[in-house]
Amino acid sequence: MTIPSASIPLVSTIFGLTYLALAVGRVPGLRTDRAGIALVGAAVMLACGMLSMADAARAVDYETIVLLFGMMVVVTYLRMAGCFALATEQVAARCSGPLTLLAVTIAISGAFSAFLVNDVVCVALTPLVLHLCQRLKRPPIPYLVGLATASNIGSVATITGNPQNIIIGSLSHISYLRFATRLAPIALIGLALNFAVVALVYRKTLTEARQDHSTADESPAPRVHRGLLIKSMAVTLVTVGLFFTGQPIALVALVAAGVLMLDRVRPAKVYHAIDWPLLVMFAGLFVVVHAFEVNVVKTWGLERWHALLESPVVLVSGLSVVLSNLVSNVPAVLLFKPLMEVMPHRELAWLALAMSSTLAGNLTVLGSVANLIVVENARRAGTELSFLEYLKVGVPLTVLTTLVGVAWLALVH
């Protein structure tokens, strides 16, 4: 198909303005958020005739949307059943020492985020960690930083760990088990580094906390709905098990959500917990990026870039760390799709993208949605985690974990 030369500058302008607005996070003078920005970008592409409605519908990867929606429902039921509250209560009872509490906070955040979408995990865990710190009279900042960074690192391990991995899993067709086998070791090493860096950066704060022998505040037992807890945990375990057996993960997640919805819990509570703006942003970005791909990128002759494509791990990791912190990791991942299609080592390139785009989220507070969720929830509770405060851990941790990830993938390859 010949692409009209007149469409190239128009599509490039629409695409550039959309991604610029995504990088800023809003439209100056308006209250439009990232979801609205992506939706407007898609609407303008369609209105200018850069894509037909049928092409736009085909551009939206419905399996990604379905999988993300299904996992949000599963995590919502776990939260309503009291699963996360019960886990933190057990921590308070057995791991009250400052370093032990930090290690367990990182372990729980990383473990849940490895299989459940990390953004939703942070929504559930942030208020519980804040309550735990208040109850045990611990300074909250080290534990909040540990929670946010561990959620990003732990989510590297599987396809269902975070939104960008969900996209990569759908586009790359890498099996759930193979993905986990390649990237789970990076997540495990990264979590160990996470504990070491946070403990080192906040050693004085944690040492002072260790010397505080005052009695912890008493707190009522967490509210647990026993029947719903058993059902939601059973469904979650079966769901994750089916992921590893190679079943279609989008279908499995949707069925899991359907089984959980057959309950006496009011559906409105579940719908309220779903991150609808994130789903809207995904749909809009799929359309915007596809229009840019078919009208502009196809004229670049990517298949001739042999010199750059021979080292996919270094190339992809370096670019994605930069782009993920400019426009956020989900939009950055979609930008790489045309490049991936001409990579000689395609699977390795997709894995490098999953690893680096996720670990890049730890660089700054703005690097991932999970970070923003922790910061905003903490702010509403009266605890300020500033941009510069976060950088103390974010910069060294991102550098160390990304280097480990690149070395590991190069070794595996």
Image: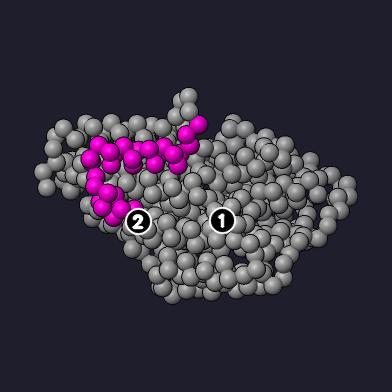
Total of numbered circles in the picture? 2
**Residue found at x 42% / y 56%:** 65
Which mark is in front, 2 or 1?
A: 1
Q: Residue furthest left?
A: 2
In depth, the one of 247 and 112 nearer the eye is 247
Q: Is 193 above or below relative to 24?
A: below
Q: Which residue is mark 1?
A: 271
x and y, in percent, of residue 77 in the image: 61, 63
x and y, in percent, of residue 350 in the image: 34, 55
Magenta span: predominant SS is helix
In the rendered structure, which amino acid carries the disc numbered 1?
Tyr
**Is disc 2 in contact with disc 1, using a CB cutoff of under 8 Å?**
no
In depth, the one of 228 and 388 nearer the eye is 228
**Residue found at x 66% / y 73%:** 230
Q: Is residue 17 magenta?
A: no
Q: Residues within 10 Å of mark 1 (few under 14, many from 20)?
A: few
Q: Residue furthest right?
A: 215
Q: Secondary structure at mark 2?
A: loop
Q: Which mark is residue 61?
A: 2
Q: Secondary structure at mark 1?
A: helix
- Image quadrant in which the C terminus is located: bottom left
Q: Which residues are magenta?
A: 31-60
Q: Residue furthest top?
A: 29
x and y, in percent, of residue 411 in the image: 38, 58
